[in-house]
Every structure is written in C-alpha cells, then in structure tokens.
Amino acid sequence: MNRKMRHYTPIDYAKNTVLKLTTLLFLIILYLPVINLIVYSFNDSKRNIVWRGFTGKYYEKLFENEVIFIAFSNSLTIAIISTVISTFLGLTTAITLWKFNFYLKKYYDIALLFPIVIPEICMGISMLVFFSYINWPNFQLWPLSLSSIIIAHVSFIFPFVAIIIRARLSILSNEILEAGEDLGANKYQVIRKIIIPFMSPALVASFLLAFTLSLDDFVVTFFTSGPNSVTLPVKIYSMVRFGVSPEINAISTLLILIIIICTYFSIRFLSKSNREHMK
C-alpha cells in the first residue's frame, strides 16, 4: 500500500518543536559572543574577566586615540575608493556580459568567479607576491600609501558587484526595451528611463555590499598593507595580541554597527528589487 507523501508548508515547519529548539540553539551560539562583546565594551574594568560596573569611558578614550582614528580613516578611505572603482568595473562588466556576445564569453564568466571562490589567504598571498614581483613602490604620501590595498580590494570585490547587477539585468525583458523604442524613445532615453531605474536597486545594494566587504576585510589587507597603511581590522588584531580590553570591544562594536547598517540597507534594496520583479 502506497502512502501518500505529505507536503509540508512553512507553517508546519514553524510548529515543529525540534526545529524551533534547533533554531534557537543556533541563534544563541551565533549571536551570544557578539552580544557579550557589546555588553563588555561598557565594562568598567581593564580586563574582561569579570563585570565591574557600567561605564562609557572607553568610548571616550576611543575617540581621543589618534592612532585608532588614523587606522579608521584609512579603512574608510580604502572602502570608499575601492567601492567606487569596484562599482564602476562591476557595472560595466555586468552590462557587457548581459548585452554582448563575444569570443570566450563563457570562460570569462568562469574567470569572474575565481576571486570569489578562492580562499582569502590565497588571494592575499598572491597579491603580496604580485606587488613584490613588480616592485610596487612604497608610497609615503597619503592616500597613495593605500594604493596596494585598494588594488587588492578591487580585485576581489568587483566580481560581487558584477554578479548582482547582471542577475538583475537578466530579468529585464527585451520586449520592454523594444516597447520604449516603439513609443519614440531613443537609445539614451531607453538607458536613462528604463535600464537605469530598473537596475538601481541592485546597483545600490551591490555598492553597500562592496563597502561592507572592503571595510571589514582583514586577511587580504594584512598581506598588502605597509607600515604607513594600517587599517582598523589590522590595528584591532595587533591590539588583541596583548589582551582583549573594553577599548577593543568598543572599536569592534562600532565596526559591527557600521556593517549592520550597510547590510540592512543592502538587504532592503535587494528585497525591493525582488518585490518589484514579483509584481
């Protein structure tokens, strides 16, 4: 006798007690260390062993620390410049792969995935070897001193931008473009009034994702940074070697806050893009 297979709905899964407990345990393991870090950033003690009371003095010391401010400004500068360049390269790459057919296109598609799937440590070592091989100059003038890190960040970030924008353009029907031309729009008007508004959610989302990837990158930055180009993640690493203090927790909390804000807006624009597509 054949039993009929039951089709489970999302509501059925939500009522499953084992699944609820598993999800809760997973969330606790995932977010408890982050919550602990944020809470102990307000601990009135130089060591994070025991709770000594609530204070915000480590945030005050943080903003008065010139070394940390320089490291943060370096990270912010690198993130902004590499994000702008990556967005431009990713946009042009996505449009090229979407609109044109050319020789070895499928192999270029595969090569575009390499910076994403290659482990970061391999990417960092390869960039280190590359800069050493070409004798990349050690600039002393800011922001040229950040040039090697910016190049390394762009090399592994722009494929993310290209993939997101191309995925958005792939659902744009040619019939819509042809309808615009039939209504009297020229190619410039088609681009300005149809293509750009259509891909704008993906463009903004990829921009924010690129900014987040660059801001919190450590491995690639560690191998390509010099004495005059210390970033915030690298600085945090150097401080952690001497012990975890509330000041380090405060830096990490601010960095987490920035990343959460960027990720939130990225997800929001991607969700908006999906809703518009469903309509």
Image (tube, grey):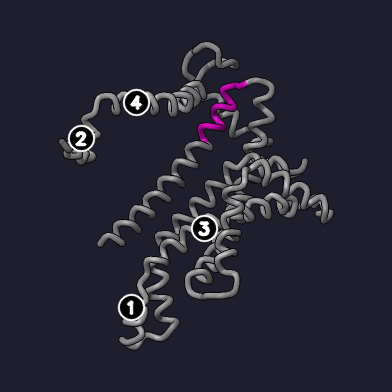
Query: Circle 4: is it few (<14), some (14-19), or many (20+) Cα within 10 Å?
Result: few
Who is closer to the viewer here, 2 or 175? 2
Which residue, given by chain and number where applicable, does mark 2 sit on? Answer: 12
Q: Which of disc 2 and disc 4 is earlier in sequence?
A: 2
Contact between labelled residues 3 and 4, with CB atoms less than 8 Å apart: no
Give the residue type that dot 2 points to: Asp
Q: Quadrant of the N terminus?
A: top left
Image side of residue 266 versus residue 250, left or right: left
- In front: mark 3 or mark 1? 1
Q: Which of disc 4 and disc 1 is earlier in sequence?
A: 4
Q: For residue 22, which numbered disc appears in the image?
A: 4
Coordinates of residue 161 in the picture (x, y in percent)? 52, 58
**Residue range (magenta):** 244-254
Image side of residue 273 versus residue 48, left or right: left
Which residue, given by chain and number where applicable, does mark 3 sit on? Answer: 161
Instruction: Work out how far the residue at label 3 is from the one at label 1, CA to CA, in angstroms.
Output: 25 Å
Could you say whether the residue bearing mark 3 is in a helix, strand or loop? Answer: helix
